[in-house]
Image (cartoon, rainbow, N blue to C red):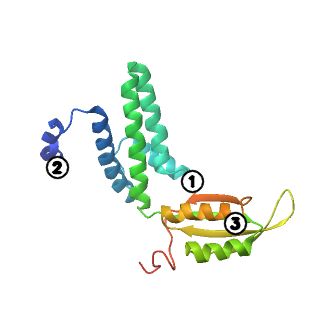
Amino acid sequence: SGILEITAPLATISVTQDVLLSAISGAILLGIGLGIVFSVDGSTGGTDLIALMVNRVIPSLPVSKCLTIIDGMVVLSAGIANGNIETGLYSAIALYIIVKVIDAIISGFDYSKAFMIITEDRDELKEAIVNDIKRGVTILDGKGGYTNNDKSILLVVVNNKKQEVSLKKLIKKVDPSAFIIVSDVHEVLGEGFKSLAA
């Protein structure tokens, strides 16, 4: 409570008169604060407490998504009640930024994407990835559920946007008929990435 008393005068300081800029900057700061709180399993006692409780019951639903749903309903209800669509839109923008910043704080800022490439040109594609993209490849055996044809699944993890774009272009060039699944990876440990000892 002592810190609240010390920082209370800051609430009256206006850095900018631009509503959008205020919404964005405020959302970033709030997202950082909530991200730090959530990363240590804490709560501010607001709607995030409900989000944490829902996450305890449904672990597969991230806290940030729970918060989006709950606060989204609050924003929508307030917009309808006040009849002020503009304020509602600013709030929606702020909420989106808050959630993205929370995810970045909790998951870290490391950029990693996992590619699962289902292909019939395994060897050519594998060689191209290893030599051109300079990434390792794990080969899994698969079978088409509809065709019953044997297929190979190449698992590749890239750690920057440039590699992601290059890999997509490479796959398109080598095997345009390949089926690709790209997913976000929160953390990668091992050779070529973070050390397991860290």
List x then y, in percent, for residue 153.
71, 68
Q: Amino acid at mark 3?
A: Val
Residue 136 appears anywhere in the view: no
Q: Is disc 3 placed on a helix, strand or loop? A: helix
Task: Check disc 1 and report the residue beneath it.
Answer: 60
- Towards the viewer: 186 or 34: 186
Pointer 3 or 2: first along the chain: 2
Q: Which residue is mark 2?
A: 3
- Secondary structure at numbered mark 2: helix
Residue type marked 2? Ile
* Of labels 3 and 1, the one closer to you: 3
Asked whether, in this view, residue 24 is left or right of residue 133, the answer is left
Q: Residues within 10 Å of mark 2 (few under 14, many from 20)?
A: few
Q: Could you tell me which quadrant the C terminus lies in?
A: bottom left
Circles 1 and 2: CB atoms closer than 8 Å: no
Is residue 70 shown left or right of residue 43?
right
Residue 43 visible in this rendered orientation of the protein: yes
Q: Position of residue 193 (x, y in %)?
A: 48, 75
Query: In the image, which is nearer the foreground, mark 3 or mark 2?
Result: 3
Instruction: Say the numbered circle drawn on residue 174.
Output: 3
